[in-house]
Image (tube, rainbow, N blue to C red):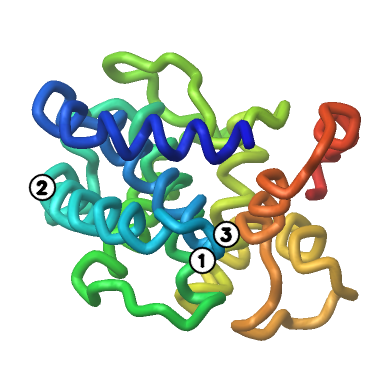
Amino acid sequence: RNIYSQARHIAEYLAFVEKTAGDHQLIGCAASLLFITLHYPEWEQSEKWRALAEKILWPALDTQVYPDGMHFEASFGYHLIVVEFMLLAFTMMRRLKLPVPSKTYRLPERMVTLLRLAQDCVDRLPLINDNDGGMVIPIELSQKERLQGLYAAMAVLYDRPDFKAAAGDEIWKCSGRARTSPSKGSDTWIWAISSVLRMRTMRQFSGLTRTT
């Protein structure tokens, strides 16, 4: 019931957010609504809400992400959270064999490539512009661990050996398999996060570990 109420609230105010905050917040709202409706297709409003989310999300991504892969707010903190929202939606759509516009589907690859290139010698991102430390799912992870999770997901989704190398041991923790090369269909860190929406108690949520 709580998730339904939040989805309804997002749907009611998404057009307002589009007019007043055309930044990472808009992407977060649209991607969240899309993800929720894909998880709960049985809701009467799901199809309508999903169409609304896609109508706003795809143009917003094309507008906000520069051709070189940098998010227009020029903040690596916001850049990172936008990538997480994108992958949350994209991996769910791929799992359900739903189409993503080809131009938009390539954006995370460019964005994560830029993150990899921007890391310093101890795997930190530059402190440029605003950064509120926001995360898509409030799991206690260091920035390095968040990036390794993204690299693991990207290695599977985009068949990138360099992302696989950057993920380190996270690629094996995320796939839940032995140390053998994961297939493209392997469950990843991002997919595992989707189970949060199905959790019924805070006790279950607090039991999440870094290998989830």
Which residue sits at x=81%, y=48%?
A: 211
For badge 1, the amino acid type reads: Thr
The residue under label 2 is 63
The residue under label 3 is 39
Compared to residue 23, the image places residue 88 above or below, namely: below
Instruction: Report how far apart the C-alphas of labels 3 and 2 lie in the structure.
Output: 27 Å
- Front-most of 67 and 21? 21
Compared to residue 207, the image places residue 181 above or below, namely: below
Query: Crowding near pointer 3: few (<14 within 10 Å), some, many (20+)?
Result: some
Q: Does residue 10 appear left or right of residue 160 in this picture?
A: left
Residue 168 picture location, percent across and down:
71, 57
* Residue mark closest to the camera, 3 vs 1: 3
Decide if residue 87 is in sight here. no
- Mark earlier in primary sequence (3, 1): 3
Instruction: Report how far apart the C-alphas of labels 3 and 1 lie in the structure.
Output: 12 Å
Compared to residue 142, the image places residue 115 above or below, namely: below
Label 2–label 1 contact, CB within 8 A: no
Which of the labelled discs sits on residue 168, or is there none? Answer: none
Which of the labelled discs sits on residue 91, or is there none? Answer: 1
